[in-house]
Amino acid sequence: MSNDPIVCPFCPLCCDDLRVDPISGETDVPCHVAQVAFASAIRPPSARLESQPIETINWDALRQSLSLKTPPVVDFIGATIAEAKTLDAMVKRGQIRLRIDRDASARSLDQTIARDGLLGTTLGDAVRRAEYAWVIGNPDHATPRLKERLNQSGLAIEYTPSPGIALLSRLHELLRRETSDAEGEPCAAASEADRLHEHFRHSRSTVVVVGDAPFEPGEETIASELLLRWIAGWNESALPIGSGDDPIVSRVTLLRLTADQNLHTVMRWRNNHVSESELSQPPRPAIRIGTRLSGSLSAVSLQIGGPDPGESIAKAYLPAAVPGVHHADTTIRGDGSVTLPLAGLTTSPHPSRIEVLQRVLGAV
């Protein structure tokens, strides 16, 4: 193992306590994302086209074999800040379209937040200040060590895999009863919602932690609006805890960790907005770059870096040097709170991920 801990570039948590063997890629933490991603980066699969290995890459011949449309749609997973800047420039030149692979719940939350705003928090503030965490959706696939981070803080945690419309509506009803004399009607979700409400009511600071796919299919738009309006309503109500002339007020905030934080941030820096034309959704990608270890993979013409998903998923596979493993770069934690340095552990005989993309497209 390396003597010094490093920042992991493969998950929006950006854990900074990993030690990695620069020869085998083995890690000293129980995280399946880090284990698979570092192993495939340090000991990558061989280049191939369909079932045939590629000994020496003829970029022109490979480009013809892939028959990519112009501009191709690229799914770039975990782009760093430097990579995001290059991708933004390639989008402006019309060389690529970018696809952000987000589930319907995440897209609905994005739309609601863009319209109504959000009282958000960071992971650091959550573990320092929150007394209670309500985790919705599945945080394990995309951020395997998030539960570990929350548990270390000592706060009380409640998990609801999929809060339905009935439960969220009941939370609204219970909040109205706190601020008025209205009587609530019983409902099927009352027992869980009532119990959650009591926890929120007696907590000075509650954080709602959003994992993957928190809402039921078909309910995403309504559920995201109900959740965010409930958070806004709770904070506007300024519900006191205890008594006295200056009582403490109960607060609720939202914590999201997004894998595409660097892309969104760079595009906002440069363009003051992120347009739908720049981040295409949901066209299927022709090229996938990086490591996606959760959810289903759509078939692509080319996989660059990461594990080789096999011929049925990717017609061709090309290994690539990875920032944070083979060379230095910077990244932003998925909550947008801090910029972190990525250090190189070892060298690679392969071009970087961006260089491979540019060579495939004939853009260098």
Image (tube, rainbow, N blue to C red):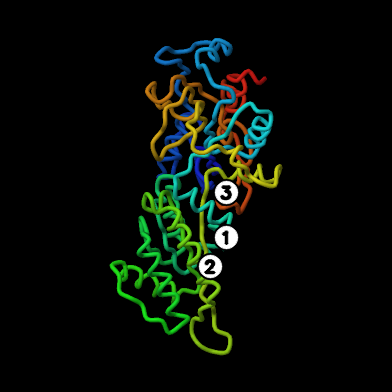
Q: Pointer 3: what residue? A: 333
- Say whether residue 291 is left or right of residue 83: left
At label 3, counting other C-alpha atoms closer than 10 Å, the crowd grade (few under 14, some 14-19, many 20 or more) is many
**Would you say the residues marked 1 and 3 are in contact, meaning their CB atoms lie under 8 Å apart?**
no
In this view, the residue in front, 11 or 192, is 192
Question: Which comes before the other along the chain, label 1 or label 3?
Answer: 1
In this view, the residue in front, 352 or 215, is 215
Q: Pointer 1: what residue? A: 116
Q: Residue at x 56, y 24 (%)?
A: 348
Residue that extends furthest to the left in the rendered view of this protein: 188
* Residue 227 on image: x %, y %: 46, 62
At label 2, counting other C-alpha atoms closer than 10 Å, the crowd grade (few under 14, some 14-19, many 20 or more) is some
**Would you say the residues marked 2 and 3 are in contact, meaning their CB atoms lie under 8 Å apart?**
no
| Relative height, residue 314 to residue 136 (above, below) | above
Amino acid at circle 1:
Asp
- Say whether residue 329 is left or right of residue 286: right
Amino acid at circle 2:
Ala
Task: Specify the label residue 234 is tagged with.
Answer: none
Image quadrant assignment for residue 347: top right
Q: Residue at x 57, y 60 (%)?
A: 116
- For mark 3, give the secondary structure: loop
* Residue 15 on image: x %, y %: 52, 47
* Residue 74 on image: x %, y %: 54, 30
In this view, the residue in front, 116 or 339, is 116
In this view, the residue in front, 202 or 97, is 97
- For mark 1, give the secondary structure: helix
Question: Which comes before the other along the chain, label 2 or label 1?
Answer: 1
* Residue 60 on image: x %, y %: 58, 11
Task: Specify the label residue 232 is tagged with.
Answer: 2
| Relative height, residue 171 to residue 321 (above, below) | below
Amino acid at circle 3:
Arg
